[in-house]
Amino acid sequence: MSHTLHFFISIVLCFVIGIHRVQSEITYIEARYPLRGTPSAPNAPWPQPQYLNASLDLTYIDPDFFIVYSNLRNCDITDKAIERYQPLFYPPKLTIRSPDTFDDSRVLISVLIEIRSKKCDVYPDLHDDQSYNITIENAYGKITAENVWGALNGLETFSQLLFITEDDYLAINASVTIRDWPRFPYRGLLLDSSRHFLPVPILKQQIDAMSYNKYNVFHWHLSDDQSWPFVSKKFPQLTEKGAFSPDHVYTPEDVQDIIEHARLRGIRTIPEFDSPGHVAALGRAFPEFLTDCYNGSTPNQAIYSKHAAREIIDVTKDEVYKFMKEFLQEVKDTFKYEPYIHLGMDEVTPACWLSNPNIQKFLKDNNMTNGTDLMTHYSNKILGIAKSIGAKSMVWQDPWDDGVKLPLGTVIGIWKDTSLLPDSPPWSYFLSKATSEGYDTVLSAPFYLNMIKYGKYETNDSVMNLEFFHWYNIDLFANFTGDDAARKRLIGAETTLWGEFVDGTNSLSRLWVRASGVAERLWSSIDVNNPEDAQFRLDVHRCRMLRRGIPAAPILNGYCGPYEAGMKQSMVNDPIFSYID
Amino acid sequence: MRLPIILLFLLAVISYSHGKQPRGSLNIFDVKPTVGQPWPKPQTIKTTSQQYAVHPSAFHFMVNSTSQSCDLLTSAFDRYYRIIFFPQTYLNHILDPELAKHEKQIEPKISLADLQDATLLKRLNVHIAQPCEQYPSLESDESYSLTIDSDSAMLESVTIWGALRGLETFSQIIYADDNLGFAVNNTMINDFPRFKHRGILVDTSRHFISVKTLKMNLEAMAESKLNVLHFHIVDDQSFPYESRTFPEISLAGAYNQAHVYSQDDIAGLIEFARQRGIRVVVEFDSPGHTQSWGLAIDILTHCYSGGKPNDEFGPMDPSRNTTFDFLKKLFSEVASVFPDHYMHLGGDEVDFDCWRSNPDVQAFMLKMGFGTDYSLLEQYYMQNVVDIVGATGKGYTVWQEIIDNNVTVKADTVVEVWKDPYPQELARVTKLGYRTLLSTCWYLDYISYGSDWVKYYMCDPHNFNGTDEQKKLVVGGEACLWGEFVDATNLISRMWPRAFSIAERLWSAADVKDPAVAKPRFEEHRCRYVRRGIPASPENGPSYCDYEYNR
């Protein structure tokens, strides 16, 4: 959309403030550096829709009479969404007055969700049409979408347009036209359940927060060196030996609970079981799968900084592949709707492999020479197994940039960058190369939100919150050298919150509202990129997330309302939003 | 008291294994939490492997018959009984009784009958030598000794404040044990703080922090033996203090009326802190950092541009007597609301540009003979403020600028150093003979990726060149969590466990300074907080706690 249009949007929404003063506010860090940018309307949606036109006058909602209904009967996705949005429309601890003093023409009576396909889809797919339209006119609203997933996006945006006025009425612009679609179809969030255990109630709140930001893929990093929390029915020893403790596990019921929680919100759950590296926890259950590393002729001896005493999977062992076939089959059956399994394959250093005489013999016998050959052997086997059980594969970029020929159709995750690894080329290089070679690609390199830094940034004439600006300003196609076809193969990105320093105590406040910045980058038009304006809308969104029980941390000085964390009307820890028994 | 010989014999025969061993099997961890070791580390602690079982139905706190009695002690007994035996429900019980009603009481895993053959610790006798003081002070004696060598343990202290510290230690050395439920080892502790002022600065102006969250933070402070809440209550951004004398200031200067501390709120916080032996030192920072004050009352300097007032305001206007009349009334109120002897008067970061622009201020400068040296005007302002506060009978704490600027202050003034290089700053201020606090190296708002507690742990307030007399003038320090990016969503998880470093540096002996040695104890303490309901975040890389935080 054009700049003129966005200009128009901000004018229209700002006018609403004049009528009903916004109830939250961000403010300067130092009085001599006032904030720049255009203040936000109290109901500005996040991420910003592609096209939005809203009238200045308001219409009101009577909680006792307002209904949302859909043209689908007995569809769990829409039925449960309509139910779920009730406490989002009417935050449980806030007062909402009935607009009985208004005439009927100023009351919104209903919203119809119209799904053109008339199908109740079961599980979202990358290629689904995620677009929706909203119209509100003459006391009636309508959300139209091709399918239920677009409808969920529309319902989320609609819920964000509602706001509680200073005199406690629930209001929305009387006339609204929105046409909206995502810039990228894949908008992921990686959470790491291995380095610290993330309890199920926290994961559910994370998934809720994702849905409030139109993220649609939960990349669940379920195993690593530190722990293996995923309970396998076939191989119970994985958690018996590999979990932190019997309390630090996800039972099959927990896993289904999470998958279902995400599915109902239009979010895919892609499990990652990383190998052949990052397998110390796996190795506690199956020590025989690991490679014996040699120091000269002495087995099981570490040469620190090169290799441990035993590490990474021994790719020459048949029982490894037998296990992987059975285990991945179980994973496929567990995540039964999801076509992809993420197979990891990152950060494999071949020193240990090459130190081992059996592997040296294996190389010789098979006319191989180096670690890349071993990795090619391993990835061929594992990708073949995945294919044989009907799963599609995602992997981190490492085998591919080591020269392993991955079959087309493998989705590559780009995570390397000069900022993380000083000797690495920048992520734009990998992105251009992988997409140009024909691979669908997901970018996470610039979105490591676990790498925190202090937010204040001073220039000669301003004091700004650089941290948010930093994430917000990432241009995914910066220095991109591929052609148009290659561009299309960048299917999206992932915000990653690696788990070294986060657990249930801080993962929500650390991720939100920062991850919302990335969400807008992935959803909204490329020219929605002014952080000084966005900070005001983001603040409105943070307060909205607080009203929904997510302890989203502030981006600048300021306040929200009487529902902030710890206050009597706080929704944080309210049973409706916190999933505590 | 000594164990009867027969019991000792029994103990030798029935050898309970130490049921809860430090983790060792997961060799990828370099951090293995300790079991039953306190934080901060006591001055001297001796333990043996002899274990006592501690059971909720067979344990009592008792005031020793020869001890002074104290209301604070009775309520502390209630708290610590809950902390020791029902830690997971403790915090809600204190902060949110409504929520606590719905919580399931966790039954002890081990029944008293299971402990027939174990040696029980049946009581802790507490003996306080001096009469009960109402409020803690900078001069309070916090020493205590704790002896556990029979079924009847002994906690002795000079004051109630020492007893509170001892109870906290006692609660920390009791640990969960697979065989005994709760257990404690034979222990002798002699303990006292290295520094008397061990503070936390909380900034409630840049973001309002709910009373409940402030109380959770006070609880967290008590669990690390921190004893001063530096309540940076107002600043440019907002004025959440509801004044009795000038209610209009918070009406105009608070973010809104949901973001105000009523007099009841303040009294509740002071009492909550007192129960835990924590002083509340309130800061009303001026003449800068006062934009929010001026929204209701005309006390700020009008800034001029092009010969006309430009709708902007600077620091307090020292050229008008009305400014000081106002401050007299306000500070006299504050002096009566906050019982601590000290009030923090701020005095930092005064910008002279607006003063320079204002013709009335210029005329005043001429009249006073300050020439164009605006630091003399700042000095004049602060001299008036310290005299006003001094007249109320209070002492004051100030940021170092006041001393840098040669203001004459009372002899008992405490000067807070926040600038770098702090060793030179400490040397300079102590050389002038003032009691001094260090906060420079403990700005917890400056977050960074990784285990930054180590950096805070390594900073020592005696790390400067000075005489023994100068060193003695350093009364402690403060961890400051300024509020630009912090509100109740993240205050606790950002403050804790990082403030553990400051707590141990200021309490424990100077030679307790190796972070590698402290780390396992740090881990245990972090998990102790989580178990007690305080969301202290992971600081040492991948790890787990037996109870994880899930809300």
Image: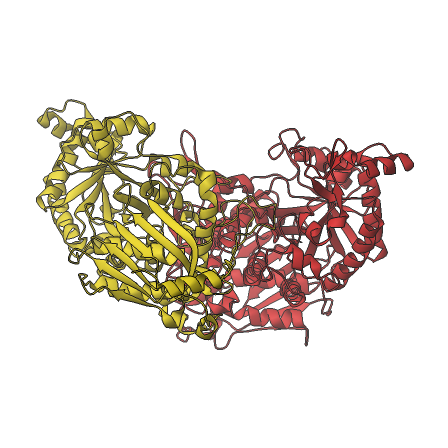
The vertical placement of A562 against A368, above or below, is: below
Q: Nearer the viewer, residue B498 or A172?
A: B498
Give the camera-side residue of B360 and B86.
B86
From this view, report whether residue B395 is shown above or below residue A80.
above
**Chain B colour in the picture:** yellow
Chain in red in the render: A
Residue B359 appearing in the image: no
Q: Which residue occupies 19% across, 53% down?
A: B338
Q: Indicate the colouring scheme.
A: by chain
Which of the two residues, A31 or A281, is positioned nearer the viewer here?
A281
Query: Which is nearer the eye, B141 or A570?
Result: B141
Q: Position of residue A245 (x, y in %)?
A: 59, 58
Residue B341 sits above or below residue A83 on the image: above
Q: Residue A400, position in %: x, y?
A: 77, 38
Number of marks in the image?
Answer: 0
Where does the image place residue A389, in percent across and percent down from the top left? 83, 58
Residue A93 drawn above or below residue B351:
below
Is residue B380 found left or right of A140 in the rendered image?
A: left
Place residue B65 in its image quadrant.
bottom left
Instruction: Examine the rendering and report whether any part of residue A284 can be seen.
Output: yes
Q: Position of residue B353 (x, y in %)?
A: 26, 30
Judge from the rendering whether residue B436 lies leftward or rightward of residue B31; answer left or right.
left
In screen coordinates, is A397 left or right of B298?
right
Name the outermost residue toward the top. B371
Q: Residue at x 84, y 45 (%)?
A: A380
Picture quarter containing residue A37?
top left
Residue at 79% of width from left, 60% of height from top? A329
